[in-house]
Amino acid sequence: MRKRQVKAAAAEAATDSDLPGSFIAAAIAVVIAAVALVPGLIAGDLGFLARLVCALGVAVFGLLSVAVAARIVGIVGVSSQPTSGITLVTLLGTAAVFAALGWDDLGARAAVLTVGTVVAVATSKAGDISQDLKTGYLVGATPAWQQLGQLIGAACACWVVAGTVLLLSSYGFGGKELAARRRP
């Protein structure tokens, strides 16, 4: 009887283990630092102050939206995920800050859209991961392994998409070699 209790306790401990909070905090800090410190990453040729505002927008709107999306998806289901609404709030908030600071050139507009895109992707992934973790719980999976798999999958997809876009951009979007649309 005692052996069965030990096995049950070990199985329960495995289903309660997440990635460490310090790892999550470090990953968030890396994303925010990259947005603020790497020129050209967020959009155009922005100065440090504009990149810092973008990084703060990603941090504030991203953290709030991820919590809201995960909670709503957990309660209601993925069909009620608020990605579009949260993206609009992010775009309005970021655009208001940029407008108040007098940044309204093309690069600033692209930066606002990029901040909205980052937050939209984070919101969407939060809902997806919430559903995956719920399913994993039902089948007795270890959350830390699920989270690590999600991280690897998302990172690989990001690099493949980024590489594809860079490859296509070397041909020139909308040019003769890579026409944006077929001419009659």
Image (cartoon, grey):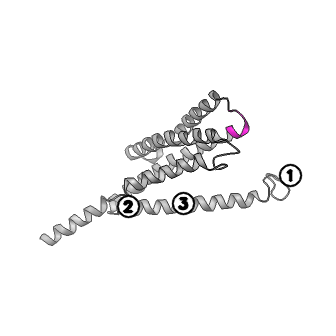
* Closer mark to the observer between disc 2 and disc 1: 2
Is residue 137 depicted above or below 2 in this figure? above
Q: CA distance from mark 2 to mark 1?
A: 51 Å
> Could you tell me how far apart the alpha carbons at marks 1 and 3 are, in whole angstroms?
37 Å
Q: Quadrant of residue 4?
A: bottom left
Q: Which residue is mark 3?
A: 155
Front label number (1 vs 3) = 3
Residue 120 image offset from top left, x and y in percent = 55, 45
Judged from this view, the residue extending furthest toward the left is: 1
Q: Residue at x 46, y 43 (%)?
A: 63
Range of the magenta residues? 103-108
* Residue pictured at 49% horizontal, 39% vertical: 60
Give the vertical position of 35 relative to 57 (above or below): below
Mark 1 Cα shell of 10 Å, populated few (<14), some (14-19), many (≥20)? few
Specify the quadrant of the image occupied by residue 175: bottom right
Which disc is residue 183 wearing? Answer: 1
Q: Looking at the picture, which amino acid does disc 3 mark? A: Ala
Q: Is residue 97 placed above or below 117 in the rendered structure?
A: above
Tell me the tag on residue 145: none
Residue closest to the far right: 184
Q: Residue at x 72, y 61 (%)?
A: 167
Task: Judge whether residue 104 is colored magenta.
Answer: yes
In screen coordinates, is 73 left or right of 10? right
Q: Position of residue 3 (x, y in %)?
A: 15, 72
Say few, some or many: other residues with alpha carbon within 10 Å of mark 2 (under 14 / 14 to 19 / 20 or more): some
Disc 1 is placed on an element classified as loop
What is the three-letter code of the residue carrying label 1?
Answer: Arg
Residue 133 at what x, y percent from top left?
39, 56
The Cα atoms of the two marked residues, 2 and 3, are separated by 16 Å
Pick the front one: 37 or 93: 37
Q: Are marks 1 and 3 in contact (CB under 8 Å)?
A: no
On residue 144, the disc is 2
